Amino acid sequence: MNRSDDLERIGEALRRAGDVLARFTPGEIAHRVKSKGDPVTEADEAVDDALRSTLPQPGEGWLSEETVDDPSRLECARTWIVDPLDGTKEFVQGIPEWCVSVGLVEGDQPVAGGILVPTRGLTLLGSLETGVTVNGEPARVRELEGLEGVTVLASRSEVKRGQWERFVGAPFAVEPMGSVACKMALVAAGLADATWTLVPKNEWDVAGGTALVRAAGGAVWRPDGEPLSFNRRETLLPGLLATPAGLERPVRDYLAS
């Protein structure tokens, strides 16, 4: 399949998102708290508008953290699943761990995606058919076969809550970081070893990252070992793991032990 149109749209959407974000100063932006306690800013909403005006065409579905869900997406063969600003908490606090995440789902699987990480100057684009580029250059996940010496990017919030204490003494190191989409982007770009979260995440948090990690030669799966599926009525996923293909079996074996 020719993905050039999809990737062109994703690239243009991320460029527009970058232009919008340049109007705001992380750490110096007002926010309000949504019903579930998460922060939201004017930047989240402005980026959402930019993405929605660029990505979906007639007949394509839309699911975004910042848009009221339209159940008609469930009948669409293609659905865009986006997080206009993953890591809003970090954005508000001025911590440089946030990004824009775009995923294209066909059926129930992410097939293409893009992530913009402005604080690192990174734009990732990719699809299952084309592989992944970082700032226009081809990229792949790292070639790893064992857990010894590996660094796993962990949710900063999960670490603070003590949910990673079970990994004290593990053969791998743990590095806390905000934004699950940002962590998945680094894995897909070959700039980090692996990442996982064992607590629920919404589809918009991880759709783009799932497409990119898989396109870059990696594996993404649920903590219970089952495959991920997207564009469901209930958007909450039970966590996920994202690793190079060579680490999938060692990680599965370690977590099962």
Image: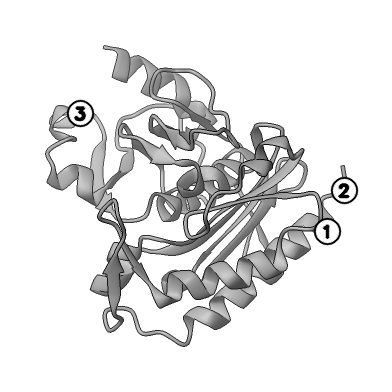
Q: Quadrant of the C terminus?
A: top left
Question: What amino acid is at disc 1?
Answer: Asp
Q: Position of residue 173 (x, y in %)?
A: 24, 40
Which residue matches tag 2?
2
When the figure is inspected, residue 136 is found, relative to residue 152, above or below; the finding is below
Q: Is residue 233 left or right of residue 29?
A: right
Colour theme: one colour
Q: Nearer the viewer, mark 3 or mark 1?
A: 1
Which residue matches tag 1?
5
Question: What amino acid is at disc 2?
Answer: Asn
Which residue matches tag 3?
170
Question: What amino acid is at disc 3?
Answer: Ala
Q: Residue furthest top?
A: 257
Kindly check if marks 2 and 1 are in contact, taking CB atoms under 8 A apart as contact.
yes
When the figure is inspected, residue 231 is found, relative to residue 43, above or below; the finding is above
What kind of element bears circle 3? loop
188 or 207, nearer to the observer: 207
> At x 18% / y 44%, what residue is drawn?
159
Q: How many marks?
A: 3
Q: What's the CA distance linking mark 2 and mark 3?
A: 43 Å
Q: Position of residue 246 (x, y in %)?
A: 50, 27
What kind of element bears circle 1? helix
